[in-house]
Image (spheres, rainbow, N blue to C red):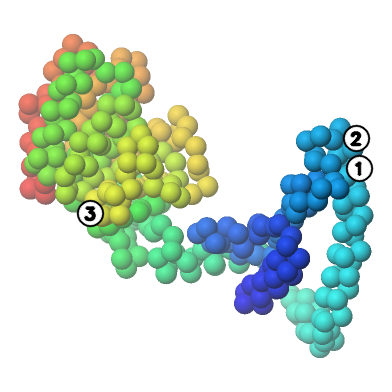
Amino acid sequence: MNALFEAAKEVCDFMKARHWEFCVIGGLAVQRWGELRTTLDADLTLFTGFGRTGTPNPRETPMAQMSKREQYRAYVEQWRRAGPELERIHAEELRRYRYDPADADTVLGLGDNYDGPPRETSGLVEMQRLFMKAARKQGLLPTVVRESPGDYASDGRRAVPARANEAGRRVYVVGDAAILERPKLALFCSVKCPGKLILETYDLAKRFRNEGVLVISPFHSPMEQECLRILLRSPHPVIWALARGIYRQIPSKPVDCRKAVTEDRLIMVTPFPETVRHITAETATTRNRLVAGMADAVVIAHAAPGSKMEDLCRDVLSTGKPLYTFDHPANAGILATGARRIEDLNLAQGRGRL
């Protein structure tokens, strides 16, 4: 890799000496911004600077004043002038390269001596996996923990409580994953919530904050996000479950989470890898089931009739896990299916005194 960086620096120095505008792209560029990726070459984009977009040249007509045909001609002319210089650079590179027949024979020998099945890939994918594995061990990427039933899985720094009904689930964690071992209360609320329940949910979130209850929630609906704002105004930890991969940059909207993450008060968990960057109905359902499965008890401020939140209530109740909601006509459906009243909730469940 050192030779690759040296080659990239040499090209960059060459362009800087000629005052050419350029930028590095590809694998080297994304590594600079924190996304680890293997690469075998250095990619650059050269800004050719037609008209006065690059080095000012009063003899050239600005691109904005050219017709389409004139712009196309300018492109062709620019590359015609650059062609000989690029060929000279390539020829110089070939002259400096020391070809060693022994190296070529060694590579060919590897192919001749390989007696395994035919390879369908170049090996770059396998190299990338090894690279990411090493980076994760060094703490450069979010921890990936595979849960196993009846025990705890750990990578030596963080641990995630395993549950029998979540066997084999992969959980990505950012923050102190040891906090996930504590008793937790799940908090949900439908997107639309009656006004009276909004006020009662505010008061409930303040009770959670003052009592030091460990809350795990999607914090996705407007009411859930308001609860997150309340919970973050305390030194107690909060668990945020995502319906997508871990954010590359900690969100500042709709709730500014940057300070809480830095102070290890906000732990982010998700069952999805970084490649999942969009929230869908399917990922939200998977996320909600994960939250309900990890919690010791579930609180649903409101489940709109006929909504997926109401379906989640029935799923939770079918497992025998305690589910609590407000005694309000809007929640009559889930109360009828077995949900308990909030007044019966023992907040000690979220403080480790089960």
**Nearer to the camera, 276 or 154:** 276
Kindly check if marks 2 and 1 are in contact, taking CB atoms under 8 A apart as contact.
yes
**Up-down relation of residue 130 to residue 74 (above or below):** below
Q: Amino acid at mark 1?
A: Arg
Q: Secondary structure at mark 3?
A: helix
Q: Specify the quadrant of the image occupied by residue 55.
A: bottom right
Kindly check if marks 3 and 2 are in contact, taking CB atoms under 8 A apart as contact.
no
Kindly check if marks 3 and 1 are in contact, taking CB atoms under 8 A apart as contact.
no
Quadrant position of the N terminus in the picture: bottom right
Badge 2 crowding class, 10 Å Cα cut-off, few under 14, some 14 to 19, many 20 or more, is few
Circle number at residue 336: none
Q: Secondary structure at mark 1?
A: helix
Q: Position of residue 223 (x, y in %)?
A: 27, 26
Q: Residue shown at 14%/40% (left/top)?
A: 209
Badge 1 crowding class, 10 Å Cα cut-off, few under 14, some 14 to 19, many 20 or more, is few
- Please give the residue where the numbered disc 2 appears in the rendered image: 69
Q: Is residue 77 visible?
A: yes
Mark pair 2, 1: CA separation:
6 Å
